Image: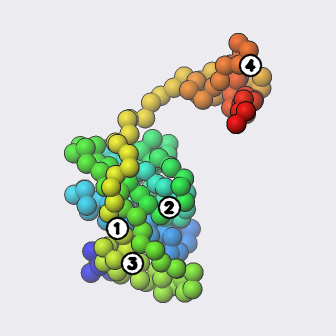
Amino acid sequence: MGEIDYMSNSDWEDCVNFHGHSCPGLAIGYRAATYGLQLLGIPLARAKDEEIVCISENEACGVDAIQWLTGCTAGKGNLLFQPLGKIAFTFFDRSSNKGVRIISRPSDYREDREKAMQYILTAESEELFDQTTLRTDLPEFARIFLSVQCEECDEQCREDRARLHDGKILCLHCFKPYDRG
């Protein structure tokens, strides 16, 4: 993939416009999305529903590129977060039941951001990422839950996020966890 001129690619420009600026983090997400889809044999096209799933192990700039390029979004339920602080992404193709986890190789992109972006956008994918063992199975499809009303604050919350305490339904804000260590 290193032979593609990403800097003049309209998909890259669309990602920059969506994110608001260009930066090394966005470039990593851009390359992660294109590489992940390539490894799964999926053409670059946004998912209309949940046919592509991404689990991001961070909540950083690169996730915006992944959203734009793959169509994976939190609202559709096909962009999931495991905020472990790793520049790692797992992509799944529901039609083939295949998945791939890629993790960014160690680098320091703080010195010269333009130079770092140029490197990220021109390097071979194998220079930027390692493929690692999948750490999770393909997630189930997103569920639709009923809403329940908290008996403390009167706000609605998803039923699977409510807690029962002293016979009252409570949202997570009103529920006081019991933890004695």
- Viewer-proximal residue, 38 or 89? 89
Residue type highlighted by circle 4: Glu
Residue that appears at 70% across and 36% down: 181
Q: CA distance from mark 2 to mark 4?
A: 39 Å
Q: Which mark is residue 151?
A: 4
Q: Residue 121 got which mark?
A: 3
**N-terminal of the two: label 1 or label 4?**
1
Q: Is residue 65 left or right of residue 59?
A: left
- Return the x and y of residue 2 as percentages of the image width and height: 29, 79
Q: Quadrant of residue 121?
A: bottom left
**Of the two numbered discs 1 and 4 in the rendering, the one whose residue sits closer to the viewer:** 1
Whether residue 10 appears in this view of the structure is no
Q: Which label is found at residue 86?
A: 2
Give the secondary structure at mark 2.
loop
* Amino acid type, mark 2: Lys
Q: Which residue is mark 1?
A: 130
Q: Could you give the CA–CA distance between mark 1 and mark 2, rounded to whole angstroms?
A: 13 Å
